[in-house]
């Protein structure tokens, strides 16, 4: 996945989101300022947005000194889905506080990147993209000079297999992969908050790149997206109403999701691809007589058999 670091954005007061009126067209990473307390550090990993058909998938990490574990327990971090938006915003402020010995980063995987990976041949499924995002974040934290001794990761597939794989990549670090890790380990809860607040800000402040160079004031997409999950009636309605029959959907949509494929097959203009394979094969087919073994391309280039010389 091609990701790059991004400077602080100004979207909904969330520094890890794109700037105001800035379309999200490619994946990127954001790193908050590093804490200066001595290590070693513990680190948690969690995501937001695996299931929705709209918007980016965001992986987040949070880290703090091992010696600061007891203080971390008192801050209120938990599975971000169990917290109100107001509480999540408050906790992001805690993450950004100079008084807290916390660091955090996010890897924002754009809808376009998700679709490109899943639709290419051979495909890169969402689990592999998620795994790559996690590994990239851990590597970048290490490259920034943070000494990690323990890493806690929310489950992705079989926990023991993933745990062993991460341990092989980062020897010397103790890995724990667990289901619902965001509710079991506060540092994973902190990562969950970073990922969730970033994704929510991306969605709520989404700038449609399709409208960037359009002057018409009456051209717009509805902002009533619903939850973004395929089962949400509001999201379903938005998908149907946002279809352009020739060009498809805006880049907010994950084209690789079955929900989207069904709508395209049912309502979009059919496309007929001309198969160039047969004409190409016939161009390189054999001739007859003295031309046997020569092809049309050779004849067009006026190439002759040495037997004619």
Image: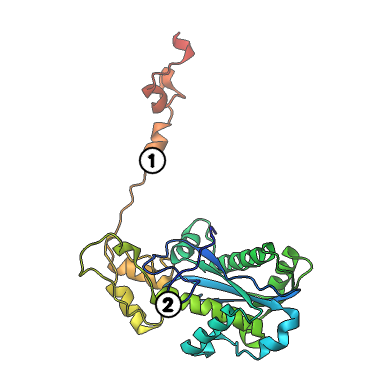
Residue 300: x %, y % from top left: 36, 23
Q: How far is mark 1 from mark 2, CA to CA?
A: 55 Å
Dot 1: within a 10 Å radius of its alpha carbon, few (fewer than 14), some, or many (20 or more) residues? Answer: few
Q: Between 156 and 11, which is closer to the camera in this rendering?
A: 11
The residue where tag 2 is placed is: 12
Q: Secondary structure at mark 1?
A: helix
The image's mark for residue 37 is none
Residue 292: x %, y % from top left: 44, 23
Q: Secondary structure at mark 2?
A: loop
Q: Quadrant of the N terminus?
A: bottom right
Residue 121: tell me if it is visible: yes
Residue 276: x %, y % from top left: 37, 43
Residue 150: tell me if it is visible: no
Q: Between 198 and 109, which is closer to the camera in this rendering?
A: 198
- The mark total stands at 2
* Side of 30 relative to 65 (left or right): left
Q: Nearer the viewer, mark 1 or mark 2?
A: 2
Residue drawn at 41 percent across, 82 percent down: 227
Residue drawn at 72 percent across, 83 percent down: 68
Dividing the picture into quadrants, the one containing residue 244 is: bottom left
Q: Is residue 193 above or below residue 171?
A: below
Q: Is residue 214 above or below residue 183?
A: above
Residue drawn at 42 percent across, 27 percent down: 295
* Residue located farthest toward the top when viewing the structure as drawn: 309
Dividing the picture into quadrants, the one containing residue 35 is: bottom right
The image's mark for residue 278 is 1
Q: Would you say the residues marked 1 and 2 are in contact, meaning their CB atoms lie under 8 Å apart? A: no
Residue 195: x %, y % from top left: 54, 76
* Side of 39 relative to 209 (left or right): right
Q: Quadrant of the C terminus?
A: top left
* Residue located farthest toward the right when viewing the structure as drawn: 172
């Amino acid at each position: 996945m091609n990701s790059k670091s991004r400077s602080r954005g100004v979207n909904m007061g969330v520094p890890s989101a794109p700037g105001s009126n800035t379309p999200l067209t490619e994946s990127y990473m954001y790193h908050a300022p590093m804490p200066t307390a001595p290590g070693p550090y513990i680190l948690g990993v969690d995501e937001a947005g695996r299931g929705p058909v709209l918007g980016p998938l965001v992986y987040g990490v949070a880290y703090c000194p091992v010696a600061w574990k007891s203080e971390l327990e008192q801050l209120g971090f938990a599975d971000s889905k169990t917290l109100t938006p107001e509480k999540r915003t408050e906790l992001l402020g805690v993450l950004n506080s100079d008084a807290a010995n916390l660091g955090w980063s996010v890897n924002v995987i754009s809808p376009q990147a998700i679709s490109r990976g899943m639709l290419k041949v051979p495909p890169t499924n969402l689990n592999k993209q998620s795994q790559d995002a996690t590994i990239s974040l851990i590597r970048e934290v290490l490259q920034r000079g943070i000494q990690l001794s323990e890493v806690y990761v929310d489950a992705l597939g079989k926990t023991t297999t993933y745990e062993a794989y991460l341990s092989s990549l980062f020897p010397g670090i103790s890995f724990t992969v667990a289901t619902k890790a965001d509710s079991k380990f506060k540092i994973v809860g902190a990562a969950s908050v970073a990922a969730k607040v970033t994704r929510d800000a991306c969605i709520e402040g989404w700038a449609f790149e399709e409208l960037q160079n359009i002057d018409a004031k009456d051209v717009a997409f509805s902002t009533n997206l619903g939850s973004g999950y395929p089962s949400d009636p509001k999201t379903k309605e938005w998908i149907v109403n946002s279809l352009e029959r020739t060009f498809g959907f805006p880049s907010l949509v994950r084209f690789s999701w079955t929900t989207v494929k069904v709508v395209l097959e049912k309502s979009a203009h059919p496309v007929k691809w001309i198969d160039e394979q047969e004409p190409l094969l016939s161009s390189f087919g054999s001739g007859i007589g003295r031309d046997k073994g020569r092809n049309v391309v050779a004849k067009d280039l006026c190439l002759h058999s040495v037997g004619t010389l």
